[in-house]
Image: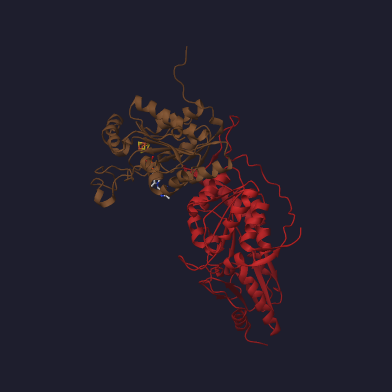
Amino acid sequence: MAIVYEKSKGLTDTPFHYCPGCTHGIIHKLVAESLVELGVLGEAIGVAPVGCSVLAYEYFNCDMQEAAHGRAPAVATGIKRVHPDKVVFAYQGDGDLASIGTAEVVHAAHRGEKITTIFVNNAIYGMTGGQMAPTTLVGQRSTTSPFGRDEAHCGKPIRIAEMLATIDGAKFVERVAVNSPANVRKAKKAIKRAFECQLAGKGFAIVEVLSTCPTNWGFTPVKALEWLKDNMIPYYPLGNFRDFEEEK
Amino acid sequence: MAKVLMKGNEAVGAAAIKAGCRYFFGYPITPSSEIPEYMAKAMPEVGGVFLQAESEIAAINMVYGAGGAGARVMTASSSPGISLKQEGITYCAGAEVPCVIVNMMRGGPGLGSIQPGQADYYQSTRGGGNGDYRTLCYAPASIQEIVDYVMLAFDKADYYRNPVLVIADGMIGQMMEAVEFKDREKIELPPKDWATTGTGGKRKPNKVNSLYLQAEQLEIHNKRLQQKYKEMEENEVLYEAYGLEDAEVVCVAYGTTSRIVKSAMKLAEEKGIKTGIIRPITVWPFPYDVFKEIGPKAKGILAVEMSGGQIVDDVKIGIEGRLPVYFNGTTGGMVPTPGSILASIEKIAGGTK
Ligand SMILES: Cc1ncc(C[n+]2csc(CCOP(=O)(O)OP(=O)(O)O)c2C)c(N)n1
Ligand code: SF4
C-alpha cells in the first residue's frame, strides 16, 4: 500500500498536549516539515518560549533550548553566534514576543541576527488562562479585559510584522494564517522561505502566524477559525512585508 | 611568563580569553565598562565574539544560549546590571548551563553610586534569583587574584555545569597591579555531550531546559542539584587565614576591605594587640570551619565590609555563638580607613596595652 501521509520526521513521537482545535499543532508541523524538506533537521537548534508552546522542546526532533519568558531571541542569538553554520529558530507566542520580549526581538531584528522566528499570534495569553495580550483586539473580552479591550485605557493591538518591517536588519517579514487549507499552504511557503533567508545568510526572518485559541476565546474549534477570519485578518492583514531577494 | 601591569577590569578580560572564553555578551555600566571595552578589542584578535547586548537581561540570555550551545562564555556588569541578570542566572543554574559572571560592585540600593561597594553579598551568596540554587562565588583581593580566579572560574563552571560568580568592588576594577599568567593545573573536565550543537542526524536531540512540570521529576532534579552544591561546599572552600591561635581580635573581610584590614592589623600590632584574619576567597561556599581554629585569647570577631553588615550573618554561623561579633562598615561608596578599623580593634581588645 502506498503511504499517502506520514508524520514529519521533524517531530518526535511525543503526543502534543494542545487543546482540541488549537492551531499550535499545525504550525509545529509546518516548521518540522520545512526543516526536513530543506535537509537541515540535523543542523537545527530551536528555542522554545514560555507559553502554551513551552513544551516545543519535547516536540521538535532537533536540539532545543527552553528560554525564559520573552528571551528567545537573545538565547537564539547566543546559540547562532557560537554555531553560525547551524540553523537556529525561535518559536514564540504573542505575550512572549510582543509584550515581555519586545526589546529582545526588536534588537535581534535590528542586528540582522541570522535566525528564523515563528511568531504565533493568537490574540490572547493562552497558557495562563486567557488574559489580555498586546495583540488582543479592541472590544475583545479576556480575563483581564472583562468588558472588552478599551482603546482609551490600554491602546490598540500591536502589529508586529509591520513594526519589524521598518527595521533594516529584518530581511524577511510575512504574516500568514492557518485558518483554511489554502492559508496553511501559504503559511508553509512563508516558513520555508524564512529558513531560506537564514540559509542564504541574509539576516533576521520572521513569520507572524495568526492562530486560534478556542479554549480561551470560548469557541468551538470551527467557530474559532471563523472568528480568526472575520476579526483578526481585517486588523492583521496577511501578506509579505519584506522579502530578501527584493533587495539588490 | 613575565609580569605585566594591568588594570583590574582589563585583567578580567585577559584572564577569560586565556582560559578559553571566546564569547562575551555585555552592557556598559560604571565601574565595569572597561571589561566590554577590552573584549571589543581583544575578542576579534582571537577569533572570538564580543557583542554589546541591548540590556543586561538580553546579555545573560545570550550567555544562556551560548553556554547551552557548549561554549565558554562570560558576561560582566556592576550591581544594578547584575540585578537584571538574576533571571538568566537562575535559568542557567536550573538548566545547568556553565558560564562566568563578573560583578564589579558599586554602592546601592537602587542606582546607588558608582563608587566601590560590597553590598551585593547577600545577592551573590544567597542567590539573587528564584528557586533553590547556589553559585560558586570568588572574591579576589588583588589583580593577580582576579587573573587566577577568573581562569579557575571557567574550569569550575564546566566541571559542575553551573554558573560561577566573581565579585570584586569597583576599587579592584580600577586599580593597576603587576600580574602573571601562570600555567595552571589541568582539571579533567567532562565532555559537553549535552550541548545543543545540532544532532547531525546521529544522536537523540539534546535539550537545555529548567522546566519539570511533574512535581516528582522536579524534586529528583532539585535533589541532584543540591547534591552538587554539597559537593562544592565540601571541595571548593578557599580562604586565607593567619594569626588565629593567639589573636585577641579576629578580623573577617574579603576583597579591598581585607587589604585595609591588614594595614589596620599592623597598626594594632604596634600597639601590642594581637590580631588574626580570616579572608574568604570563596564567599560561597563560606569558610565556616576555619573559625574553629580561633584560640582561647580571642575576645571578639570584627567583620569589615563596604555594606551595612551583610557578611555578619556568615560570621555568626561560623563562630556558633562562642564569641561576640562586631561590625565596622561603610556604605554608599565610602571606603573604610585603617584608623577606623584600628579603633574597632582596640575597643574589642579592651583598650591599648
Ligand atoms: C517572567 C514571567 N512572567 C510571567 C510568566 C507567566 N506566563 C506564562 S505563559 C504567559 C503568557 C503566554 O502567552 P503567549 O506568549 O501569548 O503564548 P500562548 O500561551 O498564548 O501560546 C505568561 C504571562 C512567566 N512564566 N514568567
Ligand atoms: S490554551 Fe489556547 S493556545 Fe493554549 S493549547 Fe489551548 S487552545 Fe492552544
Give the vertical position of B325 relative to A214 (above or below). below
In the foreground, B255 or B242: B255
Residue B25 in sight here: yes
Q: Colour of chain A?
A: brown
Residue at the limit of the structure toward the top, as seen here: A1
Quarter-of-image position of residue B241: bottom right
Colour of chain B as rendered: red
Q: Position of residue B155 (x, y in %)?
A: 66, 51
How many numbered circles are shown? 0
Where is residue B264? Give x, y as percent: 65, 78
Q: Is B175 situated above or below B233? A: below
Residue located 48% across and 31% down the image: A14
Ligand 2 placement by image quarter: top left
Image coordinates for residue A30, horizontal then vertical, percent: 43, 29
Q: How is the image coloured?
A: by chain
Q: Nearer the viewer, residue B288 or A247?
A: A247
Answer yes or no: is residue A15 visible. Answer: no
Q: Is residue B290 above or below residue A189?
A: below
Residue B249: give x, y in percent of width and height: 65, 78
